[in-house]
Amino acid sequence: MNTELSGFLTAISIAGTDAAPFLHGQFTTDVAGLGNGQAGISAWCDPKGRALFTFVLARQDDAFLLLLSPAMREAFSKRLSLYVLRADVVIGAATTAAVPPLPWLSATDTTAPAATLIRHGIPLLHPQTSGHFLPQELNLDDLGALSFTKGCYPGQEIIARLRYRGAVKRCLCRATTDNPTPLQPGAALQAHGADTQVGTVINSAITDAGQELLAVLERPFIDAGRAAADGFPVIVN
């Protein structure tokens, strides 16, 4: 299934007897607790707690399938290889056809997977946005992509501290705009009527109704429900 994901998402296979404990110590989710055939959103952070990669992670027996932006595939595989060392972990190619059914793609949405994920608030990082945001600023806690009980992983202390401080000043939101030019990941959002940057585009999709966005925006502008992109109003949903 999911042949329509090809080109929009790329699939990586991670197998080997040490795959589960190895990934459990790297990713933000409870990888060891992921059941066979289950899938969820996860992330990989740097030691400062900034999300480098966000992706869909699915388990198939003792192997894992990972879906992420094609633009992030090479960087992800290279970085993961550096950490494998002597562990029995094999990183390989996979096809999107091998991915189990995803709850974020319904039969009526599969023709527009980018817009589908945006509507579910699922952020996919690209090179322009990698390493710029804490997981909570991407709403990964609300997506069940953060475990606060499984133990250490890169950036875990900073991420946990932010949870208890509760001081997230910007977060992910859905928005729409009539801007006819596709807004690329990393594009700036401004305060309405000013040049001050107040947000960043994470993902965008052109649809029949206009352009749908996922953006990290400062909270006052989320509350106001409005920003701008290239002079076009951006309406926060």
Image: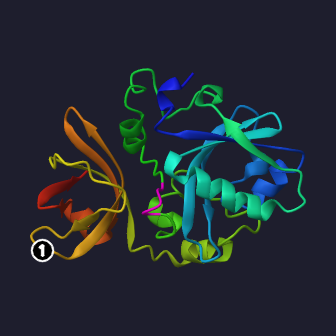
Residue segment shown in magenta: 125-129
Q: Is residue 162 left or right of residue 21?
A: left
- Residue 3, given in percent of the width and then of the height, sits at 52, 24
Residue 144 visible: no
Render colour scheme: rainbow
Residue 128 visible: yes
Q: Residues within 10 Å of mark 1 (few under 14, many from 20)?
A: few
Residue type at mark 1 is Ala
Q: Is residue 50 left or right of residue 28?
A: left
Q: Is residue 160 left or right of residue 192?
A: right
Residue 158 lies in magenta, yes or no? no
- Residue 56, given in percent of the width and then of the height, sits at 59, 44
Residue 127 lies in magenta, yes or no? yes
Q: Label 1's element?
A: loop
Q: Residue at x 79, y 49 (%)?
A: 32
- The picture quadrant where one finds residue 80 is bottom right
- The answer to whether residue 209 is above or below residue 1 is below
Q: Is residue 99 left or right of residue 119?
A: right
**Which residue in the protein does label 1 denote?**
194
